Amino acid sequence: MKKHYFFTVFLCFVSFFVGAQTYDVCVYGGTSAGVIAAYTAKMAGKTVLLIEPRQHLGGLSAGGLGQTDIGNKYAITGISRDFYRRIGQHYGKFEQWTFEPHVAENLFKQYVKRAGFAVWYNYELAEVQKKNGVIQKIKIKKATAPLAVKEVSAKMFIDCTYEGDLMAKAGVSYTVGREANSQYNETWNGVQLHDKHQFPDGIDPYKIQGDPSSGLLWGISPSALAPTGSGDKFLQAYNFRLCLTKNPANRIAIKRPARYDSTKYELLLRQIAVERPTQINWGVMHIADMPNQKTDINNKGAFSTDMIGENYDYAEADYATRRQIIKKHEDYTKGFLYFVGHDPRMPLHLREQMLKWGYPKDEYPDNGHFSHQIYVREARRMVGAYVMTQRNCEGQEKVTDGVGMAAYTMDSHNCQRILVPNPATGKMMVKNEGDVQVGGFPPYPISYRSLIPKRGECANLLVPVCLSATHIAYGSIRMEPVFMALAQSAAAAAVLAIDAQKTVQDIDVAKLQKMLITNPLMDKSQPEILLDNDVTPANVTPTGNWQATKAGGKYAATQLIDESKGIEAKTVLFAPDITKSGAYEIYVFNPNAGGGGGNPDQVAGQQTGKASKTLVRVRASDQWHERSMNTQQQINDWISLGTFELTKGNSNFVEISNKNADGLVVADAVLFVPKFLN
């Protein structure tokens, strides 16, 4: 009875609003998640509209965030992983997690073209009309022509904005800021004053050092430090992920920007006077290398590219106010880069290093070669049918309705810059507050219920980006590849809801989970087969005394290692269940044995201690084939063993051995990628 009522209500409003353009699925927000959600729904046979408030697709992934932080490759599945595989193809690799902005945006456009769905650019959400818990239609207007209003109706809506605008206008419960630890029984939420991205003790906060009557330097709040773990409405700082280049042929010099104010950067001078950095990289900012002599620059240290405290109004602001806030961040960032390279008070060696960098001619040509996407680390967060918390991240509470995974550190950037007394002198000094970096846990599932509103609030809306999570749990989940994976799940759920004539709260989640496993690319292609000692233990058989370690850049939870150099014969046998005979390319994952890190591409070159020759045997078509892997190279990457004809059944094997090893041998994950059409 419930499903018929829901769709009777829907059909009534579609008939009434004859002027509205109607689709099966409407996705609002052309972020990376938005493109993947629209692609998923269209590949499932639905009519789809993607609405982007500005003029670019891909959000942060196309806006400079080229160093992909994920924590663990195992967490990324489906079309999200396909994105990084296609990035890899562009650069001549199997998969790659670092890339140039224009490469990402072009790839998102290819997803649009491949599926063939409509995209409307430069339309901002003006109104949501809802009746009996169902979104009936939305009104959107051109950012540059407010009178150009369109109406859109759909059976299902998906909010893929970083801000949660559709969710909010639909009347769905949400929150902004940090919860108190006591609200969800957490320990890392709320106010947190720690030592990362922090000023050294003793940095004077006043315009004239030692003179409180001179006033505070720019960027410092006079607010008192609240008790640890207490909640507030503050947001972690935003910045731009900066794509610069040092290639003279592609470089545009960083010039003095309009509205430049050097007094905004006085704290940087006081910080480096104490810390005395020798390099701008890690000393003033974090410069991550991207292909073709480009960068993804992020905040590093107490005073860097994060504009702390200037985003508090952003989450709930109207579009015009947001544009002003974004412009303030852009002015600050351009001024920061110019200051580091040109202010005579900066140490000469740092100025000289900065002057080697400039804006790339071949990036963002319609935006002055500067990123079009501010890094909205956090804005609104839905309070939905289930709230993800620190307990989920740390494995203390595990959901059974998982439709995606996360694995990154619980990460919050600083939220405020304040005064605290120096314990040594009693005088006031400046400190940042809010930075948290707590990890060490394996991938964990994200509940489907965290993507949907509470029952009764909205029956045809899914929210995979501003999902239901506490501030500190969101800090782990809020990674671009995770958003893409959750967007695929949300779109697949929308498809199931339409087909079954049910609300998003009433779909068959087990059916959704099965769809994501059996049709991960939504094109009915033959799924690849992953074997891993944690994920598929029944298919992985160690012989001898291998050590399972949680350290390093393992796939999933652990990796198996052996340091005996073959003194005691040891093997690990991987036995896939092949459902269809054919050619498969086989890959062995080569983890970083001693370290981790969020980005799989950040370790390159030889790694001392690992075997330069690891014996691997493959049994295919009743024959054994030997291969030798150099595991000192392609760290945190897949090493191809070649393509083999595998027969249906369980008579095919991959065996990793420590025979004649000259160093550490690792056995972790093996991947079988079909090279044939289904």
Image (cartoon, rainbow, N blue to C red):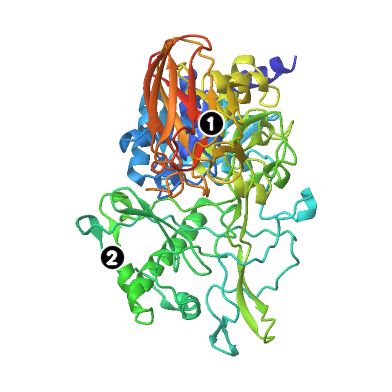
Q: Is residue 427 left or right of residue 53?
A: right
- The reply, left or right, for residue 627 in relation to residue 444 is left
Residue drawn where x is 46% and y is 62% of the image: 329
Q: Position of residue 160 (x, y in %)?
A: 53, 38
The quadrant of the rendering that contains the C terminus is top left
Write the residue at 64% across / 60% down: 234
Q: Which is nearer the eye, 546 or 460?
A: 546
At label 1, which amino acid type do we have? Ala
Q: Tell me where residue 560 appears, x and y as whole percent.
A: 57, 36
Residue 403 lies, with reference to residue 163, above or below; the image says above
Q: Residue pushed farthest front?
A: 567
Amino acid type at mark 2: Lys
Does residue 301 show up? yes
Say which mark, if any, is on residue 292. none
- Sooner in the amino-acid sequence: mark 2 or mark 1: 2
Q: Could you tell me which residue is drawn at 74 percent across and 31 percent down?
A: 456
Q: CA distance from mark 2 to mark 1?
A: 53 Å
Q: Of the numbered discs in the image, which one, if any, rests on residue 356?
A: 2
Number of other residues with Cα within 10 Å of mark 1, as a class: few under 14, some 14 to 19, many 20 or more:
some
Residue 664, x across and y down, in percent: 49, 42
In this orientation, which residue lies closer to the viewer: 233 or 190?
190
| Mark 2: secondary structure | loop
**632 on left or right of 300:** left
Quadrant of image for the N terminus? top right
| Mark toward the viewer: 2 or 1 | 1
Q: Which residue is mark 1?
A: 569
* Residue 153 visible here: no
